[in-house]
Image: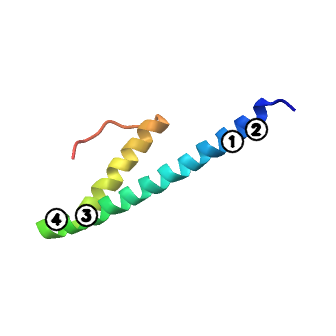
Amino acid sequence: MSRVAPHRTVSAASAAGQWCVRADLDFETNVRSEVWSIHMGRALGVDPVEVERRVQEMLAENRARLDGTARPSTGG
């Protein structure tokens, strides 16, 4: 067994731990943003159904672009 192996194991474990921390922070940030957006939208009288419809359209367009199956956008 080489002397380098334990260092690689520790580095891999450390990287995995950092990834978990980043994922947790990303999740918390996304939830915070979602809650703020909902409250601000309500205060401004924004229709949440219309916003979610547009979000779903945009997500579908982006997925299609990534898959290479995108159609030209009609605006919106």
Q: Which numbered disc, 2 or 4, marks the residue that appears first in the sequence?
A: 2
Name the residue type under label 2. Answer: Pro
Whole-percent x and y of residue 55? 31, 54
Q: Provide the residue designation for mark 4.
A: 46
- Secondary structure at badge 3 equals helix
**Residue most extreme to the left:** 44
Look at the numbered discs 1 and 4 and tell me whether their residues touch, using CB distance below 8 Å: no
Whole-percent x and y of residue 29? 36, 56
Whole-percent x and y of residue 48? 24, 66
Q: Which numbered disc, 1 or 4, marks the residue that appears first in the sequence?
A: 1
Name the residue type under label 4. Answer: Val
Pick the front one: 49 or 17? 17
Q: Provide the residue designation for mark 3.
A: 36
Q: Is residue 75 left or right of residue 69?
A: left
Pick the front one: 16 or 47? 16
Pick the front one: 16 or 50? 16
Please give the label number shown on residue 10. Answer: 1
Q: Which numbered disc, 3 or 2, marks the residue that appears first in the sequence?
A: 2
Name the residue type under label 1. Answer: Val
Give the residue drawn at x 33%, y 48%.
58
Q: Is residue 69 left or right of residue 30?
A: right
Q: Provide the residue designation for mark 2.
A: 6
Image vertical order of residue 14 relative to residue 29, above or below: above
Give the residue drawn at x 48%, y 49%.
22
Q: Specify the quadrant that holds the N terminus.
A: top right
Q: Quadrant of residue 50?
A: bottom left
Q: Residues within 10 Å of mark 1 (few under 14, many from 20)?
A: few
